[in-house]
Image (tube, rainbow, N blue to C red):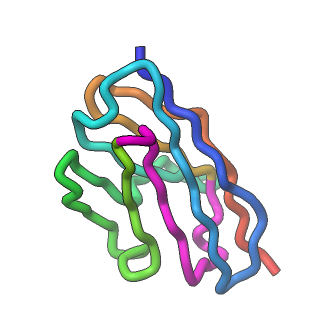
Amino acid sequence: QVQLVESGGGLVQPGGSLRLSCAASGGIFSFGTMGWYRQAPGKQRELVATITRSDTTYYVDSVRGRFTISRDNVKNTMYLQMNSLKPEDTAVYYCRLIQPNTWGQGTQVIVSS
């Protein structure tokens, strides 16, 4: 059974950067599309970015040009490099393996001065 564990969240000032990691265990990590999602207080969980097995990426408009998704199939880890952070990026960030549908527990990101 695949398990996903996120790390790297924290408190950062507007304009700052963070790199989130999602470590996978218990399955074949290199097979399948993965993604980062986020849920802000009082809002629904939303897609942030996805990456396929062949490293094709997709970003929602609000983060395109600021965030970079990547994966290391040797280390079984996916990353989200977040630059030029804004207060509206504050949320709990989750990683997801699309198939089988698997979610991590989330990591909190707070962007505030």
Task: Say which of 24 and 49 sits in front.
Answer: 24
Res 49 quadrant in image: bottom left
Q: In this view, does 44 lie to the left or right of 106?
A: left
Front residue of 74 and 105: 74
Whether residue 66 sits left or right of residue 42 in the image: it is left
Q: Residue at x 45, y 44 (%)?
A: 77
Give the image location of residue 4, x and y in percent. Answer: 50, 31
Q: Is residue 79 magenta?
A: yes
Question: What is the span of residues highlighted in magenta in the rendered image?
Answer: 74-91
Given residues 15 and 75, the one toward you in this image is 75
| Residue at (68, 55) in percent of width and height | 9
Quarter of the image that includes the C terminus:
bottom right
Q: Which residue is drawn at 43% across and 49% down?
A: 78
From the viewer's side, name the closer residue of 28 and 101: 28
85 left or right, relative to 96: right
Q: Where is residue 30 in the image (x, y as percent from the top left)?
A: 28, 37
Residue 8 at x, y percent in the picture: 66, 54
Q: Quadrant of residue 89?
A: bottom right
Residue 1, compared with residue 50, is above or below; it is above
Name the residue at 68% across, 59% down.
109
7, above or below 88, in the image: above
